[in-house]
Image (cartoon, grey):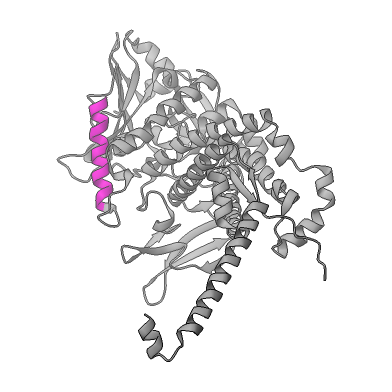
Amino acid sequence: MGTDRRNFLARAAAGAGALALSACKGPSETTWFPKLLDSAEVLTKKVQRLFAGPTTLAPEFTKADISSFFKANGTLNPGTTDYNAAVANNFQDWKISVGGLVEHPLKLSLAELRAMPSRTQITRHDCVEGWSCIGEWTGAPLKNVLARAVPRANARYVVFYCADPMSSDPTDPQYYYESLDLIEACHPQTILAYDMNGEALSVPHGAPVRLRCERQLGYKHAKYVQRLELVETFDHINGGNGGYWEDNGYTWWAGI
Amino acid sequence: MTSQDSAAGLKSSSVAGIEDKARGAWRGWQERRRTRLSNRQMFYRHTVSVRVLHWINAICLAIMFMSGLQIFNAHPALYWGRYSDFDHPALWLTSEQDAQGHLRGITQIGTTRFDTTGWLGASSADGQMTERGFPSWATLPGPQWLAMGRLWHFFFAWIFVINGLLFAVYAIWSRHFQRDLLPKISDLRHLGRDIVDHIRLRFPKGEAAKHYNVLQKIAYFSVVFILGPLIVLTGLTMSPTMDSVFPFLLWVFGGRQSARTIHFICAFSFLGFFIVHIVMVMLAGPWNEIRSMITGRYAIAPEEPPHGN
């Protein structure tokens, strides 16, 4: 993970270098200093986990608290040929596959996902930018989906692969992805959500299925989820930091 | 030298007289200085713990304030309540094009709008007017870079909290808190006189200079023991993980967006304290004040003798 993290920092530094006001190189543009700053992420994660056990629940609200306007952020429409076709046939053929370090790889249709036990929760969505919206979500608890697939003993993370390309370059689409460890993945409020405010999830909010992991910031809540992979480490996946935004300098632990 | 002086038409005897006079004046000045120095009392004002904790805290506050502005710039608006009512921000730093097509910075407080071009909403970066909450000279890092601002903020947040806890434990254990910082009922009795003295910029001399006056006590006490905890707790209230552990924080502060707004108000209260603090240091004798926070030694001017005339 060390070298990958260095790679990302180098890339982040290169990106910032282009933005930097002048040629002067501040500590943010070095490779070692952001790495030092990021050491606090591990401390924050450990201390927050010390307080927040596997089942402490994010606050839930009443219908009266639901935001009249829920801001959609990030990708508003994946717009790929495949996705447009899926929208056109109402996601009838949409499958969510679960693979990787599992005993029983499986593929779930939306109908199968909806047939599983569901959970409905009115929760607050906190964007890393600072704003919050409250909405009602219905979906299948992820732990039930994982239980069906039976993770192997060495599985530590669930990686969520999404249908939305983050780059406009078709040769390097950089599909959105995210990851949770098994503690957060098996949290009672972590669901694969298909309904929002009592209606089928809309395209800007991640139709047909998005992740809700209510103790984490918004960028963890992957939209347009297609595939789940259980892994021991995410070093080998894309930038090696466990998510699209993580590969772009954001912390993997998004609890604050 | 003498020949030139003579050329200027001065008699060497009169020059010697002036030089004597100058020497005498210098000796007198030295004497007075020596008396002043021997009369003044060097007082060991700040223990080494207080000094180290003070400077670590100063660095943390500067970095956290500027990286906090960087984070704020990612969504330069504040709200009251549980969620963001985007149509009714309490504060919004935004921008708009004027009739000439120039970018204007707008600060909206409640429903009142101010043109703050160049400062808030839109400011110059690299010679180019850009849409930006706070200007790049005030943020850390300078360019818009939320991920890096968060790294700075949360790293120094840990140092700030640990440093603050160490100070609180030390201050109570050493009785610095009870003795020097906690305003007492008896202090409050001469609150009025202290305010008048402050306004007239009359700084305490002699024995009185060894203690904080009531205004200083109120300022230091409320910044360290009220503002500090408040900014940490409102920061934690913004954490979705900590909200699952301490949901009562949301109730205390009236929701996550209110907590964010209070966090912002606390940050600017710290800035306000900093400005007053620096002004007072400058007025009270910057060298003496800064030395006392570096070496611990603070010179106290003798009490003025009773006026004979």
Q: Position of residue B285 (x, y in %)?
A: 59, 58
Where does the N terminus of chain A fall, quadrant-wise?
top left
Outermost residue, front side: B13
Q: Position of residue B83 (x, y in %)?
A: 56, 43
In the displayed structure, would residue B229 be above or below residue B2?
Answer: above
Residue B24: image quadrant is: bottom right
Front residue of A94/B236: it is: B236
Residue A5: image quadrant is: top left
In the displayed structure, would residue B261 be above or below residue A224?
Answer: below
Which stretch did the figure color magenta?
A1-18
Front residue of A140/A48: it is: A48
In the picture provided, is A50 more to the left or to the right than A82? Answer: right
Front residue of B7/B262: it is: B7
In the picture provided, is B80 more to the left or to the right than B294? Answer: right
Q: Residue at x 40, y 44 (%)?
A: B149
Outermost residue, bottom side: B9
Tell me, yes or no, if residue B268 can be seen here. Answer: no
Secondary structure of the magenta portion, mostly? helix
Outermost residue, left side: A171
In the displayed structure, would residue A32 be above or below residue B89?
Answer: above
Residue A208: image quadrant is: top left
Front residue of B120/A94: it is: B120
Does A163 appear in magenta? no
Q: Residue at x 72, y 60 (%)?
A: B198
Q: Position of residue B241 (x, y in %)?
A: 51, 29
Q: Position of residue B295 (x, y in %)?
A: 54, 43
Query: Could you tell me how many numbered marks the image carries?
Result: 0
Tell me, yes or no, if residue A239 can be seen here. Answer: yes
Q: Residue at x 38, y 35 (%)?
A: A37
